[in-house]
Amino acid sequence: MTLIPHSHRPVIEEAIEWALLHGFSLKAVPGAAIHCAFSLAPTLIEQARFDSLKQAAPVFGKLIHGVSEDYEFLTQSMAAIAGADAFFAQLVALYQQIHSQPALRLPLLFMRSDFMDDSGLGPRIIEFNGIAAGMGPFGQRAHELHRYLQQKAPEVFRHWSPADQLQLIDNPAIAQLSAALASAAFRIHGEFNDSEQPLFIMVVQEHEDNVFDQHLLEEGIEALGVRTVRRTFRQLHEQLKSGDNGRLLLEGYGGVDCIYLRAGYQHTDYLAHDLIESACCETLIQTRAFMERHRVAINATVGQQLATCKRVQMILTTMEASELTRFGLSQDEAELAKIYLGDMRPVTEESVSWFRSQESGDWVLKNQGEGGGHCVFDQDIQPRLESLQPEEYSAWAVMRRLRPAHRPRPALLVRKGEPMIVDDLISELGIFTVHVGGEPATDENGYAGYLIRSKPATVAEGGVHSGMGAADSLASYDAPDERDNIV
């Protein structure tokens, strides 16, 4: 059994303090915070592989933008879901309502493409996150923590590293994301004659505990000369107004230039018990239609949210490369996208029957939900499939399960102040991209940093916020004899 040397305890404590000092934290209760779960040393990746993923991720941003603006494709693709998922049926109806007249909003696609590196197939897309695509700042903080430990406690850092010699891969997520969002705000602001600074609204959930990641991004935006405010949908319902020439106004502030939704991916974000409605959440969800009818840069548009859902992802995986060019990709870009799109299949009467002859461990059953808790694994899949009514099928899809190689050496995770040794640590790589109006919005062709989430291979839910994952960073090998240790 691997033990934590007594001499490593002070370094672990110092890492915890560094995390709290630098906002690498979650709110525990009002007035108190706890550090974000983290790995004490990075995950190893071949530099060429990382460079390939950096090249591919902006292609997916371009693809999703094209899908989100393709009204015919999106409405046809989502038509079957109307009777299967009430929330997405409401989003489809809202999308149709918005596009019944010209939408003035400027689509701002702030997206995280999540990859997992299968030990046999190589990297494959797990999902696209087009709304509330958070934790970019925490990805940067994890990299900075590892750089700090590498310099401050090199022996302890090396002990828990996957290789003796490695080179940390920079993660400029805060700077890249902040610059892209601020640029979008200045773009809209320049179309009007306002004398005030540009205004950025972050739409948030009530009683949110993942606020520090959000505040780190706000600080980056404010440093570039943009005012930032935080509002819930309930507050925006009362405070947003229409101005001249399609200008969106916020009570007490004036013109709104950029909106970023960190809420809106579930019914409860639109729930207001003090409102009398004929249908659940109808009043607050209409706030999104109101925003899109104005000249404002916004992520996520309703179209972007639909374009990144599991059903559309499943449809895209079944299309030929030539068919993907309808969304604005070149043939070369479409073929690159096909390399990373995994194996997804619809749930139908035939596929339910087919699945009875499959090894359940080779697949994952997914519904349309965002965040943790929406996947079914192993022996639980078949009973869930059998329990579905035919009208519910379209809300689900089966995806071939990816099996990444685990870290070759024991790793150390720190959660809630307690260190934990993990012998089978695996990682998921999220790459951030930003496109404005379909065009790359960073100086690296839309690339805007990364997020590594690592977890024990035996754990199903790997989210840092909602699962058992830990924030991590990347390093490339620095010596030829370390090639065999690449995860």
Image: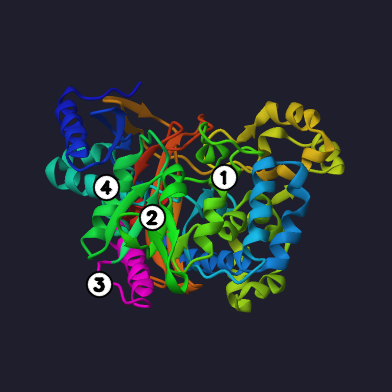
Of marks 4 and 3, the one in the foreground = 3
Question: Which one is earlier in the sequence, the residue at label 1 or at label 3?
Answer: 3
Please tell me whether mark 2 sits on a helix, a strand or a loop.
strand
Q: Is residue 49 above or below residue 421?
A: below
Q: Is residue 326 above or below residue 429?
A: below
What is the x, y in percent for residue 235?
A: 41, 44
- Amino acid at the residue labelled 2: Tyr
Please tell me whether mark 3 sits on a helix, a strand or a loop.
loop
Q: CA distance from mark 4 to mark 3?
A: 35 Å
- Amino acid at the residue labelled 4: Arg
Q: Residues within 10 Å of mark 1 (few under 14, many from 20)?
A: some
**Mark carried by residue 141:** 4
- Amino acid at the residue labelled 3: Ser
Question: Which one is earlier in the sequence, the residue at label 4 or at label 2?
Answer: 4
Per the rendered image, the range of residues in magenta is: 174-197
From the viewer's side, name the closer residue of 270 and 157: 270
Residue denoted by label 1: 283
Discs 1, 3 touching: Cβ within 8 Å:
no
Please tell me whether mark 4 sits on a helix, a strand or a loop.
helix
- Res 279 quadrant in image: top right
The residue under the point 56% across, 33% down is 373
Q: Is residue 346 above or below residue 63?
A: above
Q: CA distance from mark 2 to mark 3?
A: 36 Å
Q: Residues within 10 Å of mark 2 (few under 14, many from 20)?
A: many
Of marks 2 and 3, the one in the foreground = 3
Residue denoted by label 2: 450
Question: Which one is earlier in the sequence, the residue at label 4 or at label 1?
Answer: 4
In the picture provided, is 67 more to the left or to the right than 391? left
Q: CA distance from mark 4 to mark 2?
A: 11 Å
Residue denoted by label 3: 195
Question: Which one is earlier in the sequence, the residue at label 4 or at label 3?
Answer: 4
- Amino acid at the residue labelled 1: Thr
